[in-house]
Image: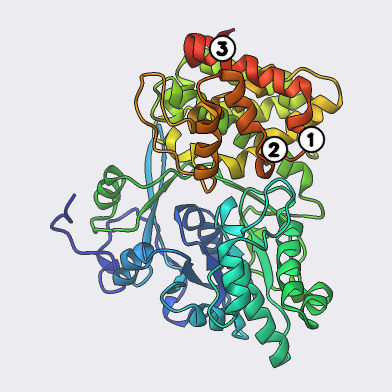
Amino acid sequence: MTQPALPRLSTATIGQVRAGVLLPSYCRASLAPGIVHLGLGAFVRAHLADYTEDALARVPGAWGITGVSLQRPDQRDRLAPQNGLYTALQRDGDGVRARIIGGVRRLLVAPENPARVVEAMADPGCRIVSLTVTEKGYCHDPATGRLNAEHPDIRHDLEHPAAPRSAVGMMVAALGRRRAAGLAPFTVLCCDNLPHNGALVAGLVADFAALQGGPLAAWIARNGAFPATMVDRIVPATTPADLDAAAAATGLWDAAAVTHEPFRQWIIEDRFVDGARPAWHEVGAQLVGDVTPFEHMKLRLLNGAHSALAYLGYLAGHETIVDAVGDAALRDFVRGLWCEEIIPVVPAPPGTDLAGYADALLARFSNPAIRHRTWQIAMDGSQKLPQRVLATIRERLARGLPIRRLALVVAAWVRYVGGVDEAGQAIDVRDPLAGVLRAALDAAGDDAAARVAAVIGIEAVFGQDLPRDAGFRAAVTNAYWALLAGGARAAVAG
């Protein structure tokens, strides 16, 4: 679509915004950057930046955001002409609420100048480096949680430390500069859906620093902070219709608008270098001693169900999550998945009723104003399944409990990455292991059991234990046969 005949959102035009739109309440011109965020996608701009906007309104401070794109310049090219300003649209069945977010003060594109990114993190004013780089952005082995030293980006960064490509390489380079300058390290705040994400990223940073040699790894271990977090807000990819809605709400054209549901949650382990952080705790974020119960609840109930609906829903012909839960067979399947297989092995966080949490999730998934595409959620399944689905399967197998529904989710993924849907149409499979998966399936031929065995034998996804578990192999194979025989809708009802 082309830009409508409206002024473009920017510092010069923000005064023309329509009445009722929430505007920054602080002085943007004097807002110094204190956060460098790696991975400036839609989610962080609708979550961390939204919380930070509220925190700045409550307790002003030097907490502007330097947004870093790690791969492409698209986000910078949309935001730079707008001086970092963008519209966040909160949408539900009751309508649209528009807000202009002003906390993004600098924009960098790592491939264009990685040294500038390292310099921004090494700057004394930077006190937090946060990340939403997706599971695959950590260059790790999802089955073990360890750094993949043979990953091309990691090998490059070890050989070219002054021009790193990976998020881990950039952070270690900046931490090394801070140590040399006698500065404290920054807090590393992972906001990706990874189990024990703080400890995991700490381990990856330690692995990389150890491969470089020298005293840096020990210095980071003594002085650094890697708090665990749990983030929750449904943020679908922005569509042309969303840009039109932002223009209608504000009276200004915004090429970088994001849309999100009303619900938001942020659980943060209260562990920061020198205690330095925005007043997130005063605007709804929960600072806790142990994030683990909240993380397990969200990863396994929300993200696990999202993946189930993504693969089964896509195969059944549903474009979005709201379409999938509108299908009675899939809706009943997800309820059974929660009640019978996930909730019984997930400890409830303090003060939380898991059955009530599941009911609230179903209501959120049913929000007609949030068009979250099944294809979008289905991306990168090799990186997502270990924590969203396989961890629950391992716990149930260890207790001798059935895994019929969970096995069907795995089988749906196996069929999905085969690249052809139930109508015989090609699937655009996006996954860092797409080549490995394709080769395994091609070698297996058309035999269903062989295809399942080939995929679940991939150690980087399933580890060494699950491929050897006869009960797991049988459950996934039977589920795969059910998908072939009657399709996804019949399989979930079986």
- Residue 346 drawn at (x, y percent): 78, 32
Q: Quadrant of residue 210?
A: bottom right
Which amino acid lies under the numbered mark 2 shown in the image of this protein?
Phe
Which amino acid lies under the numbered mark 1 shown in the image of this protein?
Asp
Q: Which residue is mark 1?
A: 465
Q: Nearer the viewer, residue 187 or 6?
A: 187
Q: Nearer the viewer, residue 318 or 136?
A: 136
Residue displayed at 54% across by 67% down: 37
Residue displayed at 65% across by 32% down: 456
Residue displayed at 67% across by 69% down: 277
- Residue 132 drawn at (x, y percent): 56, 57
- Residue 95 drawn at (x, y percent): 36, 37
In this view, 129 is above or below 362: below
Q: Which residue is mark 2?
A: 462
In this view, 99 is above or below 399: below
Q: Which mark is residue 205?
A: none
Q: Which residue is mark 3?
A: 482
Which amino acid lies under the numbered mark 3 shown in the image of this protein?
Ala
Q: Nearer the viewer, residue 470 or 323?
A: 470
Marks 1/2 in contact by CB < 8 Å: the verdict is yes
